[in-house]
Structure formats: structure tokens, C-alpha cells
Image (cartoon, helix red, strand yellow):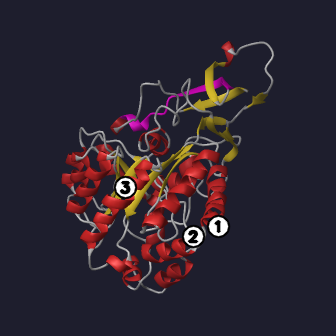
Amino acid sequence: MLYQNAHLLQIRPASQQWVAGTDMRVLPELKDAWLLTQNGRIKAFGPMSECPQGHHEETLDCTDRILMPAWCDSHSHLVYAGNRESEWMDRLNGLTYEQVAARGGGIVNSAQLLNETPEEEIYQQSKLRLQEVISLGTGALEIKSGYGLTLEGELKMLRVIRRLKEEAPIPIRATFLAAHALPTRYKDDKAAYLQLVIDEMLPRVAGDGLADYIDVFCEKGYFDIQDTELLMEAGARYGLPAKIHVNQFNAFGGVAAAVRHGALSVDHLEELDPVDVRALAGSKTMPVALPGCSFFLGIPYTPGRTLIDAGLPLALATDFNPGSAPSGNMNLVVALACNKMKLTPEEAINAATLNGAYAMGLSSETGSITVGKRTNLILTKRNVSVSSFGYRFGSPLIQQVIEQ
């Protein structure tokens, strides 16, 4: 396929895995350009003055349109059963997220629904959600387990993720998150549940090749730093690097622990201390903000401005889940990052493409216009600018999502 007369955005060399600090304000571009794809990969691109001549089976005129990498959503819980609309109503009536969880709602509620729902039905529900996020421009996606909280429940989720992974036109990464909450039967015996995760779940998950990463909800009332370190170490023994939920409601040292253990990412960070920023400095751990969760729960937004101004990188993701962020729309995430976190449009797009790809180990596959990367692209409508992604929130700016 030959795309002509396009405004190419986010052009990067293959060696560049992420951008950080002031470099996040730069989006390399090439106007009046062509791009050639072949066998699902970017083969070549350049200025229209050097456009290859001769016969091409398909060509597309992209005049006045941006052609850019599709969104890279590095944190989602897209596989689940049913919904939690009743809990949303409870919160409208004044209950907090923690109060809903304390009365049997939250993650434990989703776990009960998932364990009661046949695997095929979970797959069909999740497939529809996946199709929706792809249509909205997502070109790479991480999906977590964590609504099983039993051996069979977690395996069921991860089998569904594997099936989606095999069938989807986009790359998908699977994360094992059995340490999402304590199931009811273990509410007074966390040590026993951790042993179940380590001794029974992890060997099955790793043995069946069902996960790429391990995750822990490191938060007061859920899993503390010692628990988190124990699970990161166990995951490492099975070849599963860590991606950690941390600092959603409290900052108490989880970021530094994740960095010490070489976590690929630390996600949420709505609460952030100077010690967390210092811990991330010089590391290879990507901070990930989830502004859709902040919007839906009414909690603080991740101080992305603080992280970037400290010279750090930042990624953006949806946190798509039934309880705290029931939307997989990365376009909304980018707009929220600009309007609520005070990122520039360039910073937000870098965070939602190249840095997002890094945060799920896909830097070599997607996230930028680079020869050899996958043809996971967004073609905008006419007269869309870089600023439009933040300014025109809620507007359908995408003309076509290209997934080959």
C-alpha cells in the first residue's frame, strides 16, 4: 500500500525506545510525504519529491491528513464479565471507591461474576470490547488478569487473553495479576493466598506460557511492599518481569521497590512524593499515568508535569476496567492528559505512542513511524492538527485505523 501526500508524525530511528523530559515536546514530522507498507510492515517513506514511481496495487491520497502510529495502551483490564454499573450508582450517591469495596463491591465483585461466567461468554464480551478500542485507534494493548482470584479463574482469564492475542490484528501483551485483591475466603489469611499464587498459580501460568508480565496492586489495604517484592521475585524466577500498580491512593515506597526489582513500569502514580521521583531518575522503569481513572473516580490526576519537568519519561494508558475506568478510549486519555495534567499535545502523543509501546515491551514493533515496524497506523480526518488531539476533546478525529 502506498500512502501519498501525507503529514507523517512521530518519525523515529529504530534505536529510540522512549523519550523523556524536554524531548517529549518534540514530535519529528515530515509533511507532504509518502509511506509504503508491505506484508504488514512499514517498508519505506520520504518526501513526495522522492515518491517511488511505477505500479502499486493500492494507493491512498492523504492530502491534509496526519498519518501517525496508532495508540499504545499499556495498561488495561479489558477481559472481565458483566459490569459494575450499580457500584457507579453507589458512588454517585456518595460512597467512595474504598467504601464500595469494603461492603463487598469492587474487585471481589468482579471476581465473583467472572468465576460464575462461562469462558466462552467472557471471550465474546471481551472480543467486542477489543474491537471497539481498535476502532478508536488502539494499535497495541496490554491486558491483565486479576478478576479470577482463584487458580481456575485466573487461568480462564489468561486463556481468553491468549485467544484474543492470537486472533487480533494488533500486538497484545498479557499480565498475570492474581495479587489484585484478597478473595473472600482469604481475607484473614493473606500469607496463605500469596503462597497459593506463588506455589500453584505461577507454575501453571508460566508452564502454559499464558503471561508476559506479573503485576501486583501495591496499595494500603491490598498488598504491601513486602508482598510486592515477594511476588516480583517469584515472577522473575519464572521469567516474568514486573509491571506494578502503585501510588493510586497512597505513596509509601512502592515506586522505589519496583525500581529496585527492575520493573518495566509503575502505573497509576496519582499520589507522588519527591522520593518517588528520585527513585525513578536514571532507571529503566516507565511511569504510566491513567487519567481516565482519575476522571471517573474523581481522584487526583498523576502529576505528569512534575515527572516530565524532572527529566523523566511518561506513558499514558486507559486502565480500561469495569470499576474505575470503564472506557478504552485513548483519544479521551490524550485529551485529559492535556487539559487536566497540563501536558502539551506533543508530550501527550509521545506518551500515548512511543512511551506506551516501551511500557509493554513493544518498542521494536510499534509506537513510531520507523522502517520495519508494524503497520499499525491512524489516518486523521482533514485539517486535524497536533493540537487538535487535546483541544477538540470528544470529537471524532480519526478517518481510518490501519491494522495490517
How many discs mark residues in the rendered view? 3
Instruction: Please name the residue that numbered disc 3 is placed on.
Output: 202
Instruction: Please name the residue that numbered disc 1 is placed on.
Output: 121
User: Which numbered dot is residue 253?
Assistant: none
Point out the frontmost of discs 1 and 2. Answer: 1
From which residue to which does the magenta span run? 23-38
At horizontal 35% and vertical 42% (from top left) the residue drawn is: 313
Q: Is residue 226 left or right of residue 88?
A: left
Of the numbered discs 1 and 3, the one sitting upstream in the chain is 1
Q: Amino acid at mark 1?
A: Glu
With respect to residue 149, does 379 lie above or below?
above
At horizontal 68% and vertical 25% (from top left) the residue drawn is: 38
Q: Position of residue 127 (x, y in %)?
A: 64, 57
Q: Position of residue 43 (x, y in %)?
A: 62, 22
Label 3 secondary element: helix
Q: Position of residue 58 (x, y in %)?
A: 79, 27
Mark 2 neighbour class, 10 Å CA radius: few under 14, some 14 to 19, many 20 or more = many
Mark 1 neighbour class, 10 Å CA radius: few under 14, some 14 to 19, many 20 or more = some
Point out the frontmost of discs 2 and 3. Answer: 3
